[in-house]
Image (cartoon, rainbow, N blue to C red):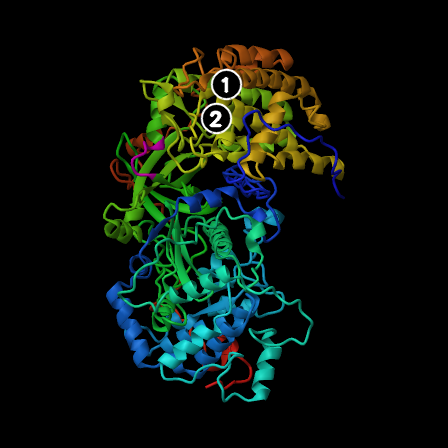
Amino acid sequence: MAVKSARRRRRPRPLDDQSDPEISEDEGESGGEEAVEVPDAAGRYPTPIRMQAPSDHDRKSIHPYVREDLRHAKHVGFFVWTEAVLGLSQTKLLSRAREIGKLRWFEDSIIQNALIDYCRVTSEKRRYDPFIHLVNRIVELASGKLPGVDKVYPIKDFCIANNADRVVKPISEHGSMGAKRRPDFLGLSATNAVKLYTKGGSVEWKDILFFGELKYVSCISEMLSKERQLRDMSHLDKEGFPPDVSRVIRKAADDRHGLFANKPTGKKTRKRAPKSAKQTQTDKKAARTAPSRVRAGRKRLAEDDLLAGLDVPSSSKRRNPWGTTNELYVGGVAAVQSGAYALELLSCTYGTRVHCFSFVVKNDKMSLWYYDSSGVIYTKEFISIVEDFETFAAVIVGFACCSTEQFGVLPSSVLKAPTPSPRTLLPADLQNRTLTMTLPVSKTKVAVTLQKPLFTQYTLTGRRSFLYTIKTTTGMSTKDMIIKFSYQVCTRKAEQDLVSIARTAGVKHLPRIHMWAELWKLSEGARRVFLRKSKGKADFEDRTLRAIVYTQYASIKELFTQHCELIPVMVDQMIDCLHDLRYKANMLHRDISVNNIMYQMRSGRHYFILIDFDMAIVLPSEGEFTYIASSIHRTGTLPFMAYELIFNAAYSRREGWRPIPHLLRHDYESLFWLALWCVLTLLTQGLSEIHAEELLEVAKEFEMGGLRQISGAKYDLCTMPIEDYDIKLPPAAQPLAAWFRAWGETLLETATMVRRQKFRSYSDDGGRNTGIDWETAGGIFTKEKLKPALLAAFPISEDAAADMESEDELDLEAEAHRRASSELPGDDASTVAPPKETAKPKRATRTRQPRAPKQTVLPPENDIRARLRPRKPRVYT
């Protein structure tokens, strides 16, 4: 049932929200991240989180952070990219291209038919099938016929499939709220490719080796005709066919592919106005300065337009009177769509994929893209599938010959795989992988085996955290523990060190961390080549994979679904924790979210715990305005971030922009958004459909849309009661109405003071010396004022607010010491052996040698590439 569309008045724009038409903030695009509908065994949910993932395949449903990641992308040379990702240096790639030239693949009938069909069409969708025929024919010709190319594996089990009309299955953990995406091309194993050609068939993101995107700009049949003449082949006529092709074949091709360039349609069309003299001179100049054929010594283009089109408005999509599309707009769309596909691909793997790659073909030019937790790396549109066919074919063969690590799979040396390891290109998860960790005090070595995957973070770049339950050495622990992996900047202080500093300073409500380790760096993989080849010209940020083991706690989502009256108790304890972090340990957490606050029952009472200190920092002593976030995105999870930080980030590209620091009051404000989010999204059971959708619609405004829209929605709630915002609280949350009004009064007073002081701070010298404490908004937003106001609106019992530190805590060091000092046979104080299962009596049977893994070899009649060929052969040459 539809939600009332006019139920809320138009919101006033924030005071300093002066829109700049030249810097539009992704209007209409959605923000936020995907959410898991059912809590995992650890009680954790993905961070960042999305309440409602958009279901449409369009740019409006793409997370706004994807654009920010692309704005910070680094471009490298074409041969640097191929050496780093495909293992093909410039010498190897050009040598392979020369071998392809000697074999005269360009003159192959299937390849020529595909090129003619590709170059003649005048729409994007009609280029999909010819491109598929082209690349799969290249792979078929390369199998066993090129030096260094295996006849069987993996190239025999590889093909590129057309996926433009099929939606890749959303990430299973996201359920019905998963984003629906349709990449144009998918690199798949032959077994998975067959799924696409069954009725209703589709593949999952975890099955995709790589993906590709194609964009149409203009007809290029003339380019192919000139290339054929340079290769001593017949030219193409004005209809794009070789002159000796019969009318029957021409008509069949036209019926199969639709309208072509220069083909009369028989329909009445409006005559175009004649070109002006200025336009004619421009066209002649463009023809004289057209890019020449790509050779080893060709001059590179001055500027790449792939990322220049990120901010081109959608109104530029229309074709101009000469039948071509705005190239800036097309380049921007291709980059954003590829980034969205990479986000889904890397967010479904539970840590199995370190990186992924893709290609973008715009008309005849190809660019290559690489994505990992450190950022995006791309090449300029350097090669042409027509003018540089041999180099293009060598790259396609390189895709087909990639190893598991080149496809981005985490190296087996980092986490030991079980033996014998199944031979597969893409493992589903890291289950049963093992590593050895050391207890920090006793130096006891503990064997850790990964069990059930719990969660993987929905993000393209950044930490990309993923969690597993674990099984440790027998007798080490009687309580459940989990292990968290995350890619952190190498120079950043480790999470266990930050928690240790806070615990030493007397901060409570902290997690118990038992073990940790640094496992692997990105610079040891594909980025090693990028770092070596850049020679300081590009700012490549290295990250290290860190593992940390801590006690498993329960999620607050299930708790608040049944007991929303505990929300004020959680907020009360977290205010104490954040205050002590700031003034006892001189730290800020900077990532308050529904996933980073857990709870544990201690003495029959709920004890809330603040976890995930990956974004926390120790503040310098010289001043508060020196610790401005240096990451690409503002610190925090979008639905729970303070509106001031989101608003500041929305204008980060404006000239004269001044960043603001993340302050303690921003963490306090995040508690308000967390409490409101829980009420809006967790208490919908039993409500009418209209009421539930109205609450979810309000919650989505905190994370979907441009950053300006999100900050505007949050600003309104900070400056008016929730009743005026037309929020009808669920019946279970009605007792919290006065508590939320107390929050609103504090936020309104803070917003008014901050904006008044900002007007005064913009003096001629640009200083901010207004004489107030920005961290507390002049003493308004403090623990001493906030807690009494909230307690007066919703009293909390003393037992609920009491501290219960050090009760029911698991101390793995004590467990290890107890085991080492026991008199159990076979125990050792320094090294504890991995757990062994009790051997069952076996019958006396003959010992058999394990069979070698079966190779996936398809017979010629079942070859998927053969199924992708045209049904009836056509002879154009």
Point out residue 803 in the picture as x, y percentages from the top left corner: 48, 16
As displayed, is residue 90 above or below residue 809?
below
As displayed, is residue 131 above or below residue 336?
below
Distance of mark 1 from mark 2, alpha carbons?
Answer: 39 Å
Question: Please, what is the three-letter code of the amino acid marked with disc 2?
Answer: Ile
Q: In the rendered structure, find residue 148 and report the number of the disc placed on it.
A: none
Q: Is residue 96 magenta?
A: no
Point out residue 472 in the picture as x, y percentages from the top left corner: 38, 41
For the C terminus, which image quadrant? bottom left
Residue 863 in view in this figure: no
Point out residue 676 in the picture as x, y percentages from the top left corner: 61, 27
Q: Is residue 491 magenta?
A: yes
Name the foreground residue: 551 vs 145: 145
Q: Around disc 1, counting alpha carbons within 10 Å, would you say few (fewer than 14), some (14 to 19), or many (20 or more)?
A: few
Q: Which residues are magenta?
A: 489-495
- Mark 1 or mark 2, earlier in chain: 2
Tag count in the figure? 2
Residue designated by label 2: 609
Per the image, label 1 sits on a secondary structure element best described as helix
Question: Please, what is the three-letter code of the amino acid marked with disc 1?
Answer: Phe
As displayed, is residue 439 above or below residue 347?
above
Per the image, label 2 sits on a secondary structure element best described as strand
Residue designated by label 1: 759
Q: Determine which quarter of the picture holds residue 256.
A: bottom right
Name the foreground residue: 627 vs 616: 627
Q: Determine which quarter of the picture holds residue 551.
A: top left
Of badges 1 and 2, the one in the foreground is 1
Point out residue 603 in the picture as x, y percentages from the top left corner: 52, 20
